[in-house]
Image: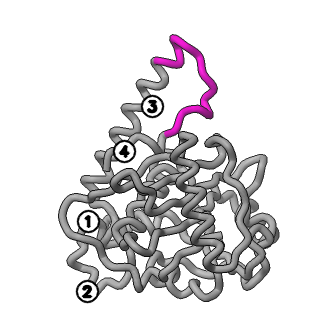
Amino acid sequence: MLVLDPPIDLLPDGAPGPRRFKIKAADSESRRGLVASLLKTRYLWRGYRTGEMPPSQAAQRFTLAAIEDQHTIGTITVAFDGPQRMSADDAFPDEVAALRAQGRRLCEFTKLAIDPTVGTKRVLAALFHVAYIVAHRLRGYDTLLIEVNPRHMRYYERMLGCHVLGEVRINRTVDAPAVLLTADFSYVMKQIGQFGGRPELSANERSLYPFAFSLTEEAGIIARMRERYDTWLEDRDRVPVPEAEFQPSDLMGL
């Protein structure tokens, strides 16, 4: 379930120039504690039920955090389809099963929260863009699923190009109504190529994509991730460690 307050339209664009924040993985106890605190604050503000964060990152899911001046100002979790299934399977089992039957490689974005006192469209776009890079560009997943409150549905349709896959159900995790949205990552790639890194276009292009990274910045992120992965492979050969311990989402100094 995604929670975003204030709505995307009400977030300020963000200061131009170099980004002051960084996107990191919530892979330490202290960082995960800060993420959990932000989620709890934003979810309780909406009257949603909250659950505990897992004690560590897992191979099937990871949590990203936007960090500025040692403070967590935004977070999102990416979950990949697999034996443990996804959160969307609970309220929308038929819709998700139909996509699997088509051979789609599914992932979902969930547990999104932005600190409304400092959050901007640039922060939100960076979280989405890095999550997209890991899911699609590096791991080859092709279809995104998102559960959102019906009140926020139009924002995601307009801002990200999502469309409705499942009508209103109750998300039992937060005990709140949700609709299931989906988007093809091929569409996301096209929009980033056309608008990414060009915030001056936001006056006419009302989506989130002008606030995303440019293709040059994206290429740099991917190169750093792959370099770190190659280094991890070399270290693994010397001192074997579980592959689940590798956190590709923590490889950016954005």
Nearest-to-viewer mark from 3 and 4: 4
Pick whichever of labels 1 and 3 is earlier in the sequence: 1
| Residue positioned 33% across, 79% down in the render | 12
- Tag shown at residue 229: 3
Secondary structure under the numbered disc 4 in the rendered image:
loop
Please give the residue where the numbered disc 1 appears in the rendered image: 197
Was residue 246 drawn as part of the magenta stretch in this picture?
A: yes
The amino acid on which the numbered mark 3 sits, given as a three-letter code, is Tyr
Residue 96 rendering spot, x and y as whole percentages: 74, 66
Vertical comparison of 62 with 41: above or below: above
Disc 2 to disc 1, C-alpha distance: 14 Å
Tell me whether the residue at label 3 lies in contact with that at label 2, contact meaning CB atoms closer than 8 angstroms. no
Disc 1 to disc 4, C-alpha distance: 17 Å
Pick whichever of labels 2 and 4 is earlier in the sequence: 2
For the record, the magenta segment spans 235-247
Disc 1 to disc 3, C-alpha distance: 26 Å
| Residue positioned 47% across, 54% down in the render | 65
Secondary structure under the numbered disc 2 in the rendered image:
helix
> Can residue 72 be seen in the rendering of this structure?
yes
Pick whichever of labels 2 and 1 is earlier in the sequence: 1
Please give the residue where the numbered disc 4 appears in the rendered image: 252
Q: Quadrant of residue 101?
A: bottom right
Secondary structure under the numbered disc 1 in the rendered image:
loop
Residue 242 rendering spot, x and y as whole percentages: 63, 26
Nearest-to-viewer mark from 2 and 4: 4
The amino acid on which the numbered mark 4 sits, given as a three-letter code, is Met
Tell me whether the residue at label 1 lies in contact with that at label 3, contact meaning CB atoms closer than 8 angstroms. no
Please give the residue where the numbered disc 2 appears in the rendered image: 203
